[in-house]
Amino acid sequence: MRVPVWLCWLGAALGAAGRSLPRLRLTYRELLSTNRSVLFVGHRGFLGFRTLYLDEYRDRLFIGGKDVLYSLLLDGASADAKEIYWPPLPGQTEECLWKGKDPGTDCANYVRVLHPYNRTHLLACGTGAFHPICAFIYVGLRGEHTFSLDPTSVETGRGRCPHEPSRPFASMVIGGELYAGLTADFLGRDPGIFRSMGARSALRTEVDQRLLNDPKFVAAHLIPDNNDRDNDKAYFFFTEKVVEADSKEHAIISRVARVCVNDAGGQRVLVNKWSTFNKARLVCSVPGPGGIDTHFDELEDVFLLRTKDGKSPEVYALFSTISHVFQGSAVCVYRMADIREVFNGPFAHRESPHHQWGAYEGRVPYPRPGVCPSKTTNQPRRQYGTTKDFPDEVLHFARAHPLMYKPVYPWHRRPLLVKTDLPYRLRQLVVDRVEAEDGQHDVLFLGTDAGSVLKVVVLQKTSSAMAEEVVLEEMQVFKVPVPITQMEISVKRQMLYVGSSVGVAQVRLHRCETYGKACAECCLARDPYCAWDGTACTRYQPSGKRRSRRQDVHHGNPVHQCLDQNLTVDDFENVEQKVLYGAEDNSTFLECTPRSPQASVQWFVQRPPDEQRDEQVKTDERILQTEQGLLFRKLHRHDAGVYYCKTLEHGFTQTVAKTVLEVITSKQLAHTFPRERGDERPPCPEPWMMPQAPKTWFKDIMHLVSSQNLRRVEEYCTRLWCGSHHHHRKSKLAQTKHALVGMDVGKKKRAAKPHSERARVPRQAAAT
């Protein structure tokens, strides 16, 4: 089958972006042992996490889980956490079971809403065993650690909280009113955007698939238009299904919708319904040849990077796609000016579901549908104090034309970041704008469905719209590969709060000393948070002394940044030297794992007697270079020498491992196993006289090397050399089994001795 040209281009364009490796991989244990991460799992050992609210004003973290609420002091230990036990109301659990729901996963009160309500209270809502309930939580003033639920405030949560523990939704509190995008009924067939609580009448969207068709709500944010508070709008980000005129299949696309905060519905039309609802498509695609774009349509998460004025935040959106061609994720950035321009543009219109969409070209009534009644929009002779004053013509038009014709395109009309063919799926996104020596950089933290977080910096090219992504770290935040369901960032404390079903982890945004103790290593990291201060890799401070700071985020070139630092010299004399024994005609493995997966590895050898000449190791079918080191599938006596493992990264070379390989010849092995009296079996033949054994694969060698069972190693040696196991030879086998497993003989500092003297000692020991 011939592959289309655009598919070849797609594989090349997206493959290059998707293959970038993290410079540093940190395991769950490494994060805990270095105090980079702290995990909270609740007082009962099971949290059933669903939501969290980071309150930096009170310096507290509020967590909602299964039948429980927690309040943690950001400066305190998890043992100081206060708990509220909040199970379903009496009878709700039993009714949930009668309706056929799972008692283990459904029939509990999963807390899913946590919002600040006023100066002293939070609003909390839970699923209530498929009977949503809400209550006010007293948290006190700043400086107090008070935490209590008022049982008299418990009321229904329908239209405020989902029935199901895991169904997507989005909500926020504005002026004492709750705005929520969710499915409000037990069966999950009544989606809408709701406004409840407060003194005004409740509002919701009409039950109409033209407005919302099986939506999955992702985020909700208040974004003011200008200084006139009457123009404030609530924005909702979601995906929904659409059916085009030329197709019978449903497609998933992403949307941004908005409503006016001061919307009061209509007087005769759209009574208690939104009268200012508009929606537009969010496009995140990779432009291709011939106008063919590769679309990422599954919206996963949205993060608002706030600006000083609060009116023009940058909207970071995480998308994913699963198709027959490829699987991947992308991050697109949208400017509020572009979003507002689309909402101020033409409305979409089509005569029937069988027609194509087009721009509405007729007369648009005044006031324009979607605008808020305010001083800004009023005209001298047309004053509208509320949406109830809008003419019926306006409300009828708004009901018939909720969709905008033009889509919202990202900045530069392309994704900021593209990741394809990953072993996991990206689910969550937060962004931190970091001040560095060469300007500002946006650092993205991406949560996966495998319990890990990627820390990525995207470097914009000055000459074009193209960008370079640098994956700084991959952190395995949770021990088991569970999906990360929520992330919050504290720029004030330089902390990341990561939630999953296992618990909530507090992770430091950076730990600069992890990169190494040399200027070159700090520079190669390219981390905007870190810089070389002359003695160590430390947190970059914009107000620090400029002459002593070394940082190169754009290029990571230590030759330029660390030229006058002695620590950048490739001083292989300080590298720990190991001695390894290998048997002739056997397999031997030289270990070398570079600190950074981004570095390329080269092997060099110095062979006796010429120790001054470095020779690059040539690999073939007998000598294989792997990610973990150098594998000799069949060792020759001329392979003896001093092997250096060197890494190359951004033009900088350093030695990371040095191994002296000693080869025990076949004759020495024959002397090691002489025939003893009383042994009726023939002695072990010379290796070249033995039948050719099957090839030993790399995984078997590594399994043996890592084994702590010396008996297994002994049996392997006997089976390999003699073809059978002789129990009376144990004492002599013990002298040579270290040769195969690559044990360091005493880990002595042998670098000071001449090579000839170092080589003489083990050979004599092996021959005795």
Image (cartoon, rainbow, N blue to C red):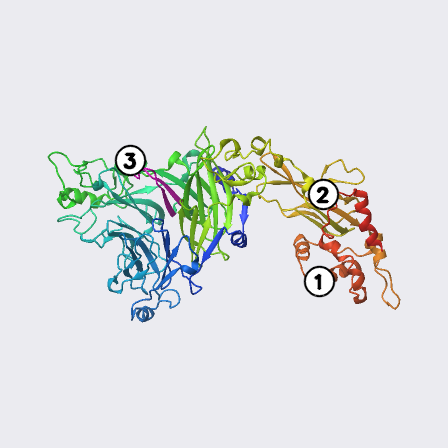
Residue 254 x/y as whole percent: 35, 45
Please tell me whether mark 2 sits on a helix, a strand or a loop.
strand
- Residue 470 lies within the magenta run: no
Q: Circle 2 sits on which residue?
A: 643
Q: Circle 1 sits on which residue?
A: 712
In three-dimensional space, the C-alpha distance between marks 3 and 2, rounded to whole angstroms, equals 64 Å
Q: Amino acid at mark 3?
A: Glu
Q: Circle 3 sits on which residue?
A: 341
Range shown magenta: 300-318
Residue depicted at x 34% and y 70% = 97
Residue depicted at x 40% and y 44% = 491
Q: Nearer the viewer, residue 257 or 137?
A: 137
The quarter of the picture where the C terminus appears is bottom right
Please identify the residue farthest to the front as the structure is shown. 143
Q: Amino acid at mark 1?
A: Arg
Residue 57 x/y as whole percent: 34, 49
Does 467 sit above or below residue 145? above
In three-dimensional space, the C-alpha distance between marks 1 and 3, rounded to whole angstroms, equals 72 Å
**Upstream in the sequence, badge 3 or badge 2?**
3
Residue depicted at x 50% and y 35% = 553
Q: Nearer the viewer, residue 176 or 16?
A: 176
Of circles 2 and 1, which is in front?
2
Does 221 sit above or below residue 149? above
Q: Nearer the viewer, residue 502 or 677?
A: 502
